[in-house]
Image (spheres, rainbow, N blue to C red):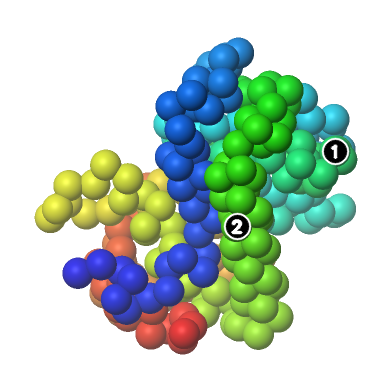
Amino acid sequence: MSIREIFPIDKWDFNSSSLLSSLSEEDHALLLAHQSEQQYSKGEIIFREGAQPSGIFYIKSGKVKKYKAVAGSGEQIIYVANAGEIIGHHAVCSGERFPDSAAALEESLIVFIPREDFMTVLEHSPSFSAGLVKLLSHEFTVLVNGLALFSQRSVRERLALQLVVLREKYKLDHQPGMPVEINLSREDLANLVGTAKENIIRILSGFREEGILTTKGRKIIVHDVKKLISIADFK
């Protein structure tokens, strides 16, 4: 059974991978003409808030957190980007500095695409430009949903929903019958949910007692995703 049958996962996923997959062979070659690859270790910064963008980044493997620095309280994670997605395109399109920072959540292989190549394809490919407009509009919807989540839901409900979303992100290359392990530190999870780490630990303990999940070190294995969806109470 697909998660989409019981939960609106698309409301929480940028799904930027669809933008590159729709490129023609010629445009794809043009976009990647001057690409460069770099391996990032867990926690390594990809770009910083306020820096001038010189291109966009394609996540070939791994996961990346997009976040804002919060004075006196660390950071607020805005989004977790998966393999196949692009990041940094908002600043390149607007011609402004990066509005947030990005760092690897795990060992990640990132492809850098120079701004000039991205803009060339954007200017010469109507289908690419139309796809980008659609993508940016969808990303705005996802961010609005996130704002509503913080203003209208309890910490327990927010954590339940984020675990549902993260479970789908960690299903990449998942084999049927195998448990999905969410490999995220309690601090990062707290920064994603928008609460103290102690609250995350306490609520996860409650979820364990209810049989919803188990933990193995920092890894979280969800056993009852339907129960989490019920707790999140998001339609």
Q: Secondary structure at mark 2?
A: helix
Q: Position of residue 22 (x, y in %)?
A: 45, 42
Which numbered disc, 2 or 1, marks the residue that appears first in the sequence?
Answer: 1
Q: Amino acid at mark 2?
A: Lys
Q: Residue at x 43, y 57 (%)?
A: 166
Q: Which residue is mark 1?
A: 95
Which mark, by number, is residue 134? 2
Q: Secondary structure at mark 1?
A: loop
Q: Residue at x 42, y 83 (%)?
A: 231
* Nearest to the observer: residue 220 or residue 86: 86
Left or right, residue 161 beside residue 96: left
Taking 166 as reference, is 39 above or below it? above
Q: Position of residue 152 (x, y in %)?
A: 65, 85
Tell me if I can see residue 34 in this picture. Answer: yes
Q: Are marks 2 and 1 in contact (CB under 8 Å)?
A: no
Q: Residue at x 17, y 47 (%)?
A: 175
Q: Position of residue 165 (x, y in %)?
A: 44, 63
Q: Position of residue 114 (x, y in %)?
A: 68, 22
Q: Residue at x 62, y 73 (%)?
A: 145
* Nearest to the observer: residue 12 or residue 43: 12
Taking 157 as reference, is 169 above or below it? above
* Nearest to the observer: residue 2 or residue 135: 135
Q: In this rendering, which labeled residue sits more in front, label 2 or label 1? A: 2
Near mark 2 (Cα within 10 A), the count class, few <14, some 14-19 or many ≥20, is few
The quarter of the picture where the N terminus appears is: bottom left
Q: Label 2 vs label 1: CA separation?
A: 19 Å
Q: Amino acid at mark 1?
A: Gly
The picture quadrant where one finds residue 47 is: top right
